[in-house]
């Protein structure tokens, strides 16, 4: 039932982020021995994050989605799907972010290397993305005990985004009402839609034998003593 509710937490035709939007990527997953760090993923899942920046301070809505890689072929569709054209997109100096201004957005690049040279904290360049990434990882660690399946990570992130975007809701009952409302709007969810990977059976099922009534409903044999008695 929890998987069914997670599958309907994205409202059809929801509004895209607008204004000033920070966009970056993060790796979700535990530390692995032998990996040098940086962009060496291993079993980790690269996840795109977009966060609205409010004026004079504060964060608005966010969007998160697993990415295939950090190339422009993956990052540009992420920005196109979640950010309104004409918004100001703030990114770091990664080469995969180049060309966002050609999509109709105002692109501002903040180089982490330049910040380190100037003795500045690189975490302050994209505070919204880093805050959401930390909260999401802490939420996954507390709710799922760190056991996050790559196949179901997208639905888990949808649940986090749903909770984060309604964190200022004054009536918690309205959040539950929105979940029920989304469940009614969406199409029916079947079990086969929730299974991420079909596992073949080790032993193929055998066909049933001749059909009929169960043994308990069959008539007793005619040679029973109480049947022959007059």
Image (tube, rainbow, N blue to C red):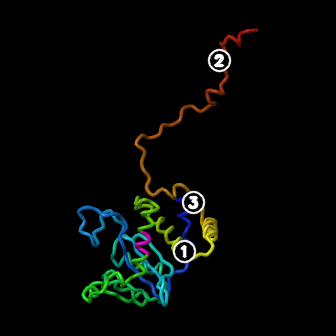
Q: Which residue is mark 3?
A: 189
Q: Percent x, y for residue 73?
A: 36, 77
Q: Is residue 30 left or right of residue 79?
A: left
Q: Percent x, y for residue 230?
A: 76, 9
Which labelled disc corresponds to residue 221?
Answer: 2
Q: Secondary structure at mark 1?
A: loop
Nearer the camera: disc 2 or disc 1? 1
Of mark 2 and mark 1, the one earlier in the sequence is: 1
Task: Name the dominant secondary structure of the magenta segment.
Answer: helix
Nearer the camera: disc 2 or disc 3? 3
Q: Secondary structure at mark 3?
A: loop
Q: Secondary structure at mark 2?
A: loop
Which labelled disc corresponds to residue 167?
Answer: 1
Which residues, given as a range, are shown in magenta? 132-136
Q: Quadrant of residue 67?
A: bottom left
**Residue at the top extreme?**
230
Nearer the camera: disc 1 or disc 3? 1
Residue 48 to residue 183: above or below: below
Q: Quadrant of residue 34?
A: bottom left
């Amino acid at each position: 039932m929890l998987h069914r509710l997670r599958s309907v937490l994205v409202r059809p035709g929801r509004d895209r982020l607008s204004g000033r939007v920070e966009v970056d990527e993060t790796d979700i997953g535990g530390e692995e021995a032998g990996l040098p760090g940086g962009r060496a993923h291993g079993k980790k899942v690269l996840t795109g994050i977009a966060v609205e920046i409010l004026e004079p301070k504060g964060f608005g809505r966010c969007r998160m989605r697993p990415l295939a890689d950090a190339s422009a072929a993956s990052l540009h569709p992420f920005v196109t799907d979640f950010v309104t054209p004409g918004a100001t997109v703030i990114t770091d100096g990664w080469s995969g972010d180049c060309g966002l201004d050609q999509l109709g957005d105002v692109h501002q690049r903040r180089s982490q290397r330049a910040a380190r040279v100037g003795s500045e904290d690189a975490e302050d360049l994209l505070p919204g993305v880093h805050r959401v990434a930390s909260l999401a990882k802490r939420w996954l660690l507390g709710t799922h005990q760190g056991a996050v399946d790559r196949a179901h990570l997208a639905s888990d992130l949808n649940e986090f985004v749903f909770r984060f975007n309604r964190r200022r809701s004054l009536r918690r009952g309205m959040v539950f009402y929105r979940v029920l409302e989304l469940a009614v709007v969406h199409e029916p969810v079947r079990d086969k839609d929730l299974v991420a990977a079909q596992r073949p059976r080790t032993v193929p099922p055998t066909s049933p034998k001749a059909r009929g009534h169960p043994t308990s409903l069959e008539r007793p044999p005619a040679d029973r003593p109480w049947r022959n008695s007059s």
